[in-house]
Image (cartoon, helix red, strand yellow):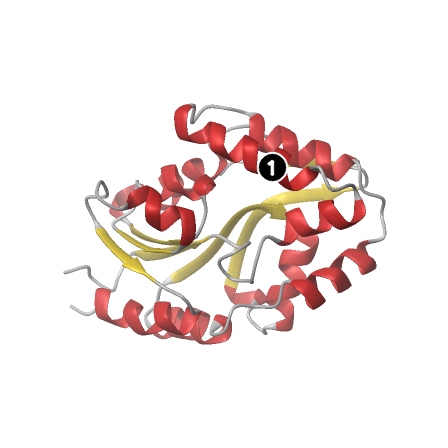
Amino acid sequence: MIQRRRTVLQIDFDGTLVEGDASTGILEHFAGPEWPERINAASRTLLTGPDSTGLIDTMTAGYANLGTDFDAYVDYVRKHHPARPGLRELIDTADQLDIEAHVVSNGFDFYIREHLRAAGVDERVAAHTGAAEGKALSYAGPDGSPVRSRFKERWAKHLSRDGVTVIYVGDGTSDIAAASMCAVVFARDSLLTGLQGRFQGQLRPFETLYDVARSLREVTRS
């Protein structure tokens, strides 16, 4: 049984902590209708080429096609990509179990931090995301260096250093490689189907984040 101490929760954001993919929604609405398929195609390349730079390259190119009306982008996310039920409960439960919470996402930092702030959990969650500065978007690995591939995997490897147990929560194709490195995975959508039948750890489906919070107590019970 997994011990309570030395445990980290690595959480995807889009489609996991919120309904739908907020970054794709922003790009489709403000930059053009072609962006969802471009992002989906880039994500699929990770299945056969995990070192592909396609996803981060596509995200940075999409961001470069946006303007700087961040208030409008955040308002759009609030209206169209609400928090999945149980976000506050999940972080509260992690706190009670002495589990660090880390959001690792290919999404944009400005709406991710705003969602966490609105839920009242921003000071209790470390966020590793696409960092927007002016017209540029960048991704940094654990050592602070810019990266273009294996973003989530690098963080999973870093968080699991020194024998720390990493529990993963995610939903998408871009989560598969990183989740495969973890002891327990809470999964839905393409992450769930991508791991079924081949993941060696504990694989637990979820719908709401209340489901994850309840199950988190089970998997950390000594």
Which quarter of the figure is the N terminus placed in?
Answer: bottom left
Residue shown at the point (82%, 59%) measured from the top left = 72
The 10 Å Cα crowd at callout 1, few under 14, some 14 to 19, many 20 or more, is: many
What secondary structure is marked by label 1? helix
> Can residue 145 be seen by looking at this rendering?
no
Which quarter of the figure is the C terminus placed in?
Answer: bottom left
Q: Is residue 78 left or right of residue 194?
A: right
Placement of 210 over or under 144, stated as above or below: below
Which of the 4 image quadrants contains residue 101? bottom left
Q: Position of residue 59 (x, y in %)?
A: 65, 36
Placement of 87 over or under 37, stated as above or below: below
Residue shown at the point (34%, 47%) measured from the top left = 193
Residue shown at the point (73%, 39%) measured from the top left = 63
Q: Is residue 202 left or right of residue 185?
A: left
Which of the 4 image quadrants contains residue 54? top right
Q: Position of residue 169 (x, y in %)?
A: 39, 56
Q: Depth check: 209 or 135 in front?
A: 209
Q: Which residue is mark 1?
A: 39
Q: Depth check: 204 or 222 in front?
A: 204
> Can residue 105 be seen by looking at this rendering?
yes
Q: Position of residue 37 (x, y in %)?
A: 62, 37
Placement of 77 over or under 65, stated as above or below: below
Q: Position of residue 100 (x, y in %)?
A: 40, 60
Q: Amino acid under label 1?
A: Ile
Residue shown at the point (19%, 59%) measured from the top left = 2
Q: Is residue 56 left or right of residue 100?
A: right
Which of the 4 image quadrants contains residue 11? bottom left
Placement of 15 over or under 87, stated as above or below: above
